[in-house]
Image (spheres, grey):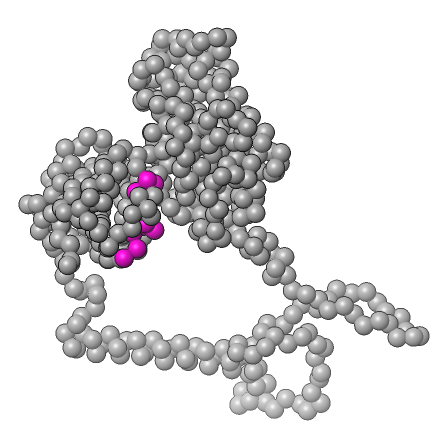
């Protein structure tokens, strides 16, 4: 999901909302869409935490601050809320803290419906500072509103369940919604919208664009009668040749020459098909020969090569993928991407590793960003250490070098450090499943990974 940030944060829980959305990353790999944070539509005096325009619908996110953290929250939309059994008292005549939030969300939904009446719209009430379990009545869960404590998992689940259109929104519809919700948001180019799952231009109606055109029949000649009949289906195209217009077959007056078994000779299409099979077999033989030569030269197949093990911080890290790039911002998310766009960078080096600690296989994502000077690096480090400021995308996740399923780095331990003009960032989490918050073992791995080498 591509995030557009405005500085307004109307609730204390707004930071948690931003952190949860930033963790979803760019592109449609997780959910896709455009998220506008800190929204204030024209003429409004109130702010909304977020409007999420996904390929399957629009979700309005409103933050609601609770007095204290709780273990169990009972949250009926039309009744009194209870935190750990104690009623939550709200000012005025509101029966629960979400009443004003729901009114605000409905006002925003009315703006969207006036512009795009067919787009599904849902509402997420994001509560904080922390709630372990939230209970909504079944009748409320069947409707378009969810009450959640904002984590990456809960926001993803709520968004997927609320945005459920059969066909994806087009780029034209996205720009239409943005024009009424946040007209001062930056223009979203076609490439960005396409990457987030929205059809662009002629892709918006692929069936219409690809439908074959049937030529109109010639007018009937004088004195003749025409009979309406469906156009014949086009013949399959011969590989390598143009598509021929459908014509009636002309019988060959010559009798077929029987083959050795008394059968008519094979058709031209059959000969072409067998020629393609023969060519494919030749390619396979050439590939096998190339592999045999490589093995004979001592190279071996890629799977036979031993993995690269890199010692750092007292641990051994097995390399999964490494790469360097002079473009930094496209590989970051959230506020980190904004900072990299503003200040630029000299180079970004990324690496993905795994290591074993106490019998547990741990995945590590490593990034080293080099800036033009120490001051810029220190400024970037301060942004990186701010909770919810985004991250640098894991390389092996992008390149598919992790075994399926790839690690999610949910609740991963984070470490950061600056070495002159270079800032190092690490994430460590279980290769399978989510981490437990505050895991000391993962924090130790993250700190050790800060010592991974960076090529000159």
Residue bounds of the magenta highlight: 326-336
Residue 328 lies in the magenta stretch: yes
Q: Quadrant of the N terminus?
A: top left
Residue 210 lies in the magenta stretch: no
Q: In which quarter of the image is the C terminus?
A: bottom left
In the rendered image, residue 268, in percent from the top left (x then y), is placed at 56, 82
Picture quadrant where residue 407 is located: top left
Lateral position of residue 284 relative to residue 370, left or right: right
Vertical comparison of 408 with 69: above or below: below
Residue 449 at least partly seen: no
Residue at x 86%, y 69% (from the top left corner): 226
Q: Which residue lies furthest to the right in this view?
A: 223
Say how many tags the image has: 0
**Observer-nearest of 369 and 248:** 369
Residue at x 56%, y 36% (from the top left corner): 180
In the rendered image, residue 347, in percent from the top left (x then y), is placed at 24, 55
In the rendered image, residue 103, in percent from the top left (x then y), is placed at 53, 21
Vertical comparison of 230 with 110: above or below: below
In the rendered image, residue 230, in percent from the top left (x then y), is placed at 75, 64
Residue 26 at least partly seen: yes
Residue at x 56%, y 26% (from the top left corner): 107
Vertical comparison of 386 with 344: above or below: above
Picture quadrant where residue 267 is located: bottom right
Lateral position of residue 1 relative to residue 421, left or right: right
Q: Which residue lies furthest to the left in this view?
A: 314
Vertical comparison of 262 with 380: above or below: below
Residue at x 47%, y 40% (from the top left corner): 185
**Observer-nearest of 186 and 403:** 186
């Amino acid at each position: 999901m591509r995030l557009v940030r405005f500085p307004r944060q109307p609730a204390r829980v707004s930071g948690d909302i931003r952190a949860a959305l930033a963790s979803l990353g760019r592109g449609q790999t997780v959910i896709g869409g455009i998220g506008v944070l800190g929204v204030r539509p024209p003429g409004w005096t109130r702010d909304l935490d977020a409007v999420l325009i996904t390929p399957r619908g629009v979700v309005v996110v409103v933050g609601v601050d609770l007095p204290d953290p709780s273990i169990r929250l009972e949250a009926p939309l039309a009744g009194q809320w209870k935190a750990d059994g104690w009623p939550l008292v709200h000012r005025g005549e509101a029966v629960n803290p979400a009443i004003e939030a729901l009114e605000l969300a409905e006002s925003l939904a009315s703006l969207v419906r006036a512009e795009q009446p067919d787009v599904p719209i849902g509402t997420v009430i994001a509560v904080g500072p922390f709630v372990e379990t939230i209970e909504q009545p079944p009748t409320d869960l069947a409707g378009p509103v969810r009450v959640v404590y904002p984590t990456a998992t809960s926001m993803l689940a709520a968004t997927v369940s609320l945005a459920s259109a059969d066909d994806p929104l087009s780029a034209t519809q996205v720009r239409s919604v943005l024009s009424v919700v946040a007209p001062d948001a930056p223009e979203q180019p076609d490439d960005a919208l396409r990457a987030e799952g929205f059809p662009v231009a002629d892709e918006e109606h692929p069936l219409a664009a690809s439908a074959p055109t049937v030529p109109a029949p010639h007018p009937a000649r004088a004195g003749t009668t025409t009979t309406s009949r469906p156009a014949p289906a086009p013949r399959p195209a011969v590989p390598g040749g143009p598509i021929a217009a459908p014509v009636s077959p002309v019988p060959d007056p010559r009798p077929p020459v029987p083959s050795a078994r008394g059968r008519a000779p094979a058709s031209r299409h059959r000969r072409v098909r067998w020629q393609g099979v023969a060519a494919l077999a030749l390619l396979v033989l050439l590939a096998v020969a190339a592999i045999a030569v490589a093995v004979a030269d001592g190279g071996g197949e890629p799977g036979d090569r031993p993995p690269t093990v890199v010692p750092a911080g007292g641990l051994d890290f097995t390399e999964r993928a490494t790469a360097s790039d002079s473009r930094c911002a496209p590989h970051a998310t959230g506020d980190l991407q904004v900072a990299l766009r503003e200040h630029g960078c000299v180079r970004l080096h990324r690496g993905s590793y795994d290591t074993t600690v106490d019998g547990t296989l741990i995945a590590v994502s490593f990034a080293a960003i080099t800036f033009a000077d120490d001051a810029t690096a220190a400024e970037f480090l301060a942004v990186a250490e701010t909770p919810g400021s985004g991250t640098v995308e894991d390389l092996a996740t992008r390149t598919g070098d992790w075994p399926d399923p790839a690690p999610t780095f949910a609740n991963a331990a984070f470490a950061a450090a600056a070495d002159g003009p270079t800032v190092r960032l690490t994430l460590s989490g279980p290769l399978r499943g989510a981490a437990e918050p505050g895991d000391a073992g993962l924090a130790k791995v993250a700190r050790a990974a800060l010592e991974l080498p960076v090529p000159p």
